[in-house]
Amino acid sequence: MGNNMNIDLNEIDDNCLTIAVTSGKGGVGKSNIVTNLAIQFGLLGKKVMVLDADLGMANLDVLFGVRPKYTLYHCLEGRKDLLEVITSVNQNVKLIAGGSGISDLAELDEKSRTSFLQSLQKIRQYTDILIIDTGAGISSNVISFLSYADEVLLVSTPEPTSMADAYGIIKTLGKTGKDLPKIGILVNRSNTPMEAYEVSTKLTTLAEKFLNLKIAYKGYILEDEFIQKSVRSQRPLLSIYPESKAAICIRKLADSWVNVNKTHQPKSKMGFFQSILSLFSRKK
Ligand SMILES: Nc1ncnc2c1ncn2[C@@H]1O[C@H](COP(=O)(O)OP(=O)(O)OP(=O)(O)O)[C@@H](O)[C@H]1O
Ligand SMILES: [Mg+2]
């Protein structure tokens, strides 16, 4: 497939950093992390686009406290263009809300697939950071979006089950071959910075030893009851409890990310083109 993809290679030239947030096990905090990272990147002056690609349980609209008129569902149904389903969260942060009813992007026909990718391409032109919430697990959708990204933020809690499933994601990603995104571990719900560091060290050591993959440690978010409070009030933690423990951790993560990426070089044009072609080509 791919040769009828109507994308001019010369147009594929942008500085948009794409971060996919994922986890092996569900419920580890991805959507809250995506929401608050986006808010902080926005506060740092970045133009941020958030894509809710959790096709099963899209809920970022609820966490941001916005009511989208249209969602990804309308776009993938062919009723709206991707550009028409963008909801504004604030001046710098925009959301492409997910919708229920979509099962697998890989099942889209060629025409919808091409127009989705072309619109995403247009969006990238005026976006500094694209954050994708992939949902949990290893479906073809998730793996496609992970390969599309420049960086994968893999979230694990200190629970052994969550760590085992995180390792499963690393293993699967490793098998997808060349032009892998950078993979970084974020430990959520840790009780101390030390605990998080130990969790990350276990995962990075295993990945290096058995898969020959270098994984970075991106940081930690402490266990914090204010996350649940913010979810209940449908306002991002950073907006209502900016001085809470978890908010401070997320700010630190976003700030250092922006500093490190001052000289962000996106994937090469050709690599990027390959990755969008493969975005939908993998079936389960
Ligand atoms: N650092 C934390 N401290 C305390 N509770 C947390 C923390 N992070 C997440 N939680 C709790 O976990 C719940 C699930 O978080 P979230 O919805 O972000 O997870 P998820 O990984 O996106 O889940 P899913 O896989 O279902 O999409 C939150 O509603 C909150 O109650
Ligand atoms: Mg989620």
Image: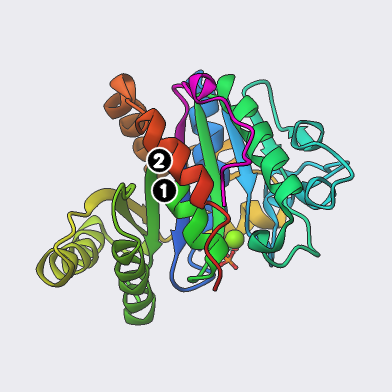
**Residue to which mark 1 is pinned:** 245
Percent coordinates x, y for residue 139 in the rendering = 53, 70
Percent coordinates x, y for residue 178 in the rendering = 28, 52
Give the prevailing secondary structure in the magenta stretch. loop
> Looking at the image, which residue is at 66% across and 59% down?
105
In the depicted view, which residue is nearer to us: 240 or 170? Answer: 170
Percent coordinates x, y for residue 122 in the rendering = 64, 25
Residue 100: quarter of image: bottom right
Residue 195: quarter of image: bottom left
Residue 12 part of the magenta segment: yes
Which numbered dot is residue 99? none
Residue 261 part of the magenta segment: no
Distance of label 2 from label 1 (alpha carbons): 5 Å
Ligand 1 has an atom within 8 Å of the beta carbon of the residue at disc 1: no
Q: Which residues are magenta?
A: 1-18
**Quadrant of the rendered image holding ligand 2:** bottom right
Above or below: residue 270 compared with residue 209:
above
Mark 2 Cα shell of 10 Å, populated few (<14), some (14-19), many (≥20): some
Amino acid carrying label 1: it is Lys
Amino acid carrying label 2: it is Ile
> Looking at the image, which residue is at 54% across and 26% down?
42
> Looking at the image, which residue is at 55% across and 57% down?
134
- Secondary structure state at the residue bearing disc 1: helix
Quarter of the image that includes the C terminus: bottom right
> Looking at the image, which residue is at 80% across and 37% down?
85
Mark 1 Cα shell of 10 Å, populated few (<14), some (14-19), many (≥20): some
Residue 35: quarter of image: top right
**Residue to which mark 2 is pinned:** 248
Q: Is residue 35 rendered to the left or right of residue 190?
A: right
Above or below: residue 58 compared with residue 63:
below
